[in-house]
Amino acid sequence: MDKLIRGTGTAIVTPFLSDGSIDFVSFKKVVDHQLDGGVEMLVPLGSTGENPTISCEERTAILRWIVEYVDHRALIIAGTGTNDTRTSVEFTSEALALGADAALVVTPFYNKPTPDGLFRHFKAVADVGLPVVMYNVPGRTGLNMSAETTLRCADIPNVVAVKEASADMAQCMEIIRNAPAGFNLLSGEDNLTVPLISLGACGVISVTSNEMPREFSRMVRFALAGQFEEARALHFELLDLMKINFIESNPGPVKAALAMMGIIRENLRLPLVPVRAENKLKIRHILEHLDAVMLEQMG
């Protein structure tokens, strides 16, 4: 593909109003925060965007709005994967028609396809013509896509990358070492981003960059440039935030943090609920510490 899927992609939250409808005013703040922070890619309608609760009409409205508003200032990688191949093809076709740059397609969840079923699933989606980033996240799907299957799918035209969230470094290394030209691995675990880039990954699709896009994307760019001392320093500054973002089900913690930052309201759709009060205190403490560190560095 002509557009380079490399750097920091933010799996952006979907802001809601108190009545549960999409809050496009806050959505603009979320996107502006990302663009001002220098991220290279925006990933709407992923699990961080609460995609299981988003209706088809809302998907269309979100994608149409974000493509028009971003206007090529960052790549748009639309979450289009479901556990039904036909629906995944339909969502990917719509993303192509609306102007998305690529699709993020999760391995089908719950029905647990065989390796051949995975291959056929990704081929059917890739045949739409939009570049596909596969998404392996066994913690959510109940299925780990092996390195062997990933590499088989990597030969499918239009399959350009995999977001690896298995936390299996050996599996990631096998993919990176044996990947065909033009196929890349993106970290799906924020805290493994720098280690994986040191081994040849080309970036990350991140949750933490919702809150700290400037610092997180600087970390990634340092790592991609081989400046690992600088990348490591930022990694350890952000590590507590990376961990606290998963103290409860994602995106509860990140939405709590963004609400504290004045970017969105802390509204989620059931079955997700706001994080517990004691965890909000922990999140606030980490944000306050990071603010103090960043201000000190700027001074």
Image (cartoon, grey):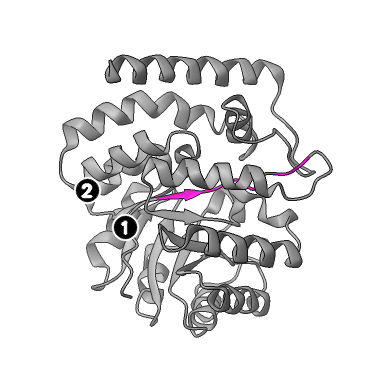
Give the main secondary structure, helix, strand or loop, of the magenta stretch: loop
Is residue 142 something one can see in this rendering?
no
**Residue 2 visible, this angle:** yes
Q: What quarter of the picture does the C terminus occupy?
A: top left
Label tally: 2
Q: Earlier in the sequence, mark 1 or mark 2?
A: 1
Which residue extends farthest bottom?
A: 127
In percent of width and height, residue 193 lies at: 34, 43
Q: Is residue 107 above or below residue 156?
A: above
Q: Is residue 220 left or right of residue 208?
A: left
Q: Residue visible at 48% across and 80% down? A: 126
Q: Would you say residue 63 sits in the magenta stretch?
A: no
Looking at the picture, how far across and down is residue 56, in whole percent?
74, 67
Residue at 52% from the left image edge and 81% from the top image edge = 120
| Rendered image: mark on residue 224 | 2
In the picture, which quadrant includes the N terminus?
Answer: bottom left
- Answer with the quarter of the image where residue 275 lies: top right
